Image: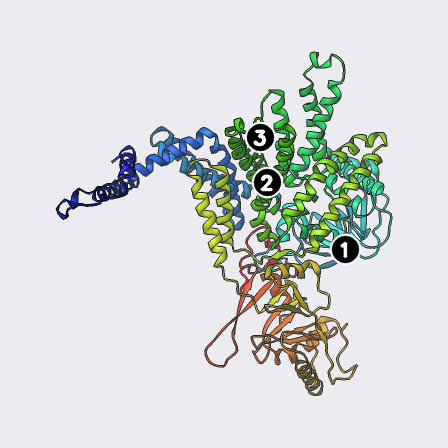
Amino acid sequence: MSEIEVRSLMQDADRVAPAPPASVSIGSMSATPANARGNLVFRLVKSCAALAHARLRPEAIAAHWREAVEEESAFGHGLVLVPVLLAAGVLTWLSLPYDLGLIKLALLLCVFGIAALLCNLRVRALRAPRIAAGLFTAGMMLAAIEASRIDTIVLDGPVTTNLRGKVFSREKNDRDHWRYGIVIEQTTKPTLRRAPLKAMVLSRSPHAPLAIGATIEGRARLSPPSGPALPGLNDFAFDSYFRQIGAVGYFYGAPLSPIADGAATVADRSFWMRMAEYLAALRETVGERIRTAVGGDTGALAAALVTAEERAIGRDTVEMLRQAGLAHVLAISGLKMVLAAGTFLIGARTVLSAVPGLAQRVAIKKVAAAGALAMVFLYILISGGAVSAVRAWIMISNMLVAVFFDRMSISLRNIALAAIVIIVITPSAVAGPGFQMSFAATLALVAGYARWRQRAEAEEPAVAGRWWGRRLVTGFVIGVVATSLIGGLATAVYSAAYFQRLPAYGLLANILAAPLISIVIMPFGLFAMVLTPFGLEQYPLAVMAWGLDGMLVIARFVTSLDGEFLTGRVGPLAFVLIAAGGVILCVLRTWLAGLGAVLLFSGLVCLAFEDRQLPAIVVSEDGRLVGLVTDAAIATNRDRPSDFLFSQWQRALAVDAHVAPMPAQGAVADGLYPEAKLRPAKAQTRTIDAATAAAIRHDINSALGQVSPNAFSCREKEWCIARSDAGWTVALVENPYLFEVLCNQVDLLIVPGSTERTCSSGRARILSGRLLRLVGAIEIFAEPVAGDELPKMRFKTSFTSLQRPWERHRAYDWRSDGFVDNSPAL
């Protein structure tokens, strides 16, 4: 039966009388209205079953699929899916444990291209899947091309050397220390065999800052960019590789700027290098001028909104903004660029319309759009070029260009165009939270407002009679709430996956701060930039500072509510399902959008049933920080562990409390231990006498007896020892002279140095600095075994293969000037 017949049967069933007659005979029971209604219900169920069977036939499903695909194509959503497929290919290539060669990818792309062309001529039903496969392969190829084109040399290990190079960037942090970006020209004492091209080096000593483009030299301690703090967390070496930063470190003392031949220096630099130096100097000058005019954290915030330089903002202020859910204010995003462009467009149009007769002779709207286009171009030049800023600039530029042709350009296709440009130019940006969060929020907002606009147009006759002021206020309030809610929901999974935290009152903070950002902060920030050439920027900057102070008051209030959630790590399957479901739900409009809802629900189910087992022990990649993990706290071997590292542990493990080590109160007299400053090379070959060994063992046992389980007891510059919940005795040795004694007393021994010694008793599992360099940070899980034996150690490492370009430096051995076996395992 057809749907029309089913509807007719349902109407007949509704017309049946609900009440039976007062008196009927048994013989006429079949003719009662109740029986008639029962027959109609039976026919209705039978018809629905037949209809479902007809719709679930392969031919019917294929027909519905084709209709939905054609309708989505009519909406232009085929273009919107192009960057999604390209990004999926890029992420797949970057996540593989090995490289796929360019030749293989090129051949595969040709195969899919030819297959799609043949499908266009013969079998059109298979054209879309093969085009999708071709775009996916093209994304992989773009990532492979970028990785081979950059070929960054990353420092293989920590080293102290004399450094000489050219300054290409500089930033001042909140402690008035200068951080220089240096193009390395020479290293001496020792000369590095694989010297990186660029390094970021901090100077803590007071000195006159060196200008961008100047020669800089000094004694520096350089290290490779750090890897993940724990398996699955952000790999900072990956980001540095694609920025061509091969080392980070700090100067011993103040750096110097030797006198150099200025003419030769200029001649050696290309036009693009000189232009980059000029823009970097302009950016730094603008930021310093704003910070000088306003001062304090407020001035640093004002400068960050213009130049995206965040290092001058106090750490407490940044943390407060993050906990309040207002950290996005620090980024140059679409909202800020829209406010800046919109303010300029409206202001310029208002000024031009005040000129008598000009509006009749010139299209002032297009003149104002041209000025706004130039303004946002200058804005992107001094903003540092972050992914969110570039995305916003492309979209705003597209919208302003559309004004010249009297058209609107706020659509999903505008987002797709910006995404395609970024993916083609810098595919590696797809793997960063900036790209993903920026596009997720923008996509959700555009899709959400498109659906809201359709609903508003349908209800327009009913609300046309309302007072315009009421509609304006209501629209503003609803817009602020809806923008904050949609943006927060769209980026929640990314915030949990990359930062392992969610602000509980982020919606409240954004609702309260949105009027200040939209009406005060950004408009007056734009006025300040326009008036800067005339030396009048202090007046609008004062108003901007007032708005920023109000925003900080809001952030402080929301933070006092103590509503931040530590989410812990999000599994890759749940993350992919939720992210893909959200994209499909926003992009598609037909019943195919339901597939996004299914993926989204599946991701939430995976998230709810994820294995949340905590590791028993965590070890940093340099071996200098060790943590014993319980549900209540993380006990470390440092009184004040590195905030950069330990805060990541806290968020990833969703454990906030910290247990500091206790000083060991042993029986060994001062001077019995060898000097801690003994050179490692001599310490590893030196033997220890029996009396000293016995005293050290007594000292260790005494320390273990005095300290509670899951807490360290440490003897400064010698050792730290603890007993974990699993029953393992864990020790970290800082003096290599004590290696042999400790390895016979413990179950797990961490040696930060590059030792190759083995334990004679074979009891201890040894984690040396060289091994940790290969495998990265480690998590150790307790696997129960039968009987009364201690649980088995299960190791989870950050790296299982070192074949990727940004990981290859870990396998380099400077002694042999080659690469060791790049398949680390425990």
In x, y percent, where is residue 214? Answer: 81, 42
* Residue in the image at 60% along x and 61% along y: 654
In x, y percent, where is residue 55? Answer: 30, 39
Total tally of numbered discs in the picture: 3
Measure the C-alpha gap from mark 2 to mark 1: 46 Å
Measure the C-alpha gap from mark 2 to mark 3: 18 Å
Q: Which mark is residue 586?
A: none
In x, y percent, where is residue 137? Answer: 47, 41
The kind of secondary structure element at disc 1 is: strand
Name the residue tied to disc 1: 250
Determine whether 217 is above or below 65 in the image.
Answer: below
Q: Amino acid at mark 2?
A: Ala
**Left or right: 765 as drawn, with respect to 591:** right
Q: Residues within 10 Å of mark 1 (few under 14, many from 20)?
A: many
Quick one: quadrant of the C terminus?
bottom right
The kind of secondary structure element at disc 2 is: helix
Disc 2 or disc 1, which is closer to the eye? 2
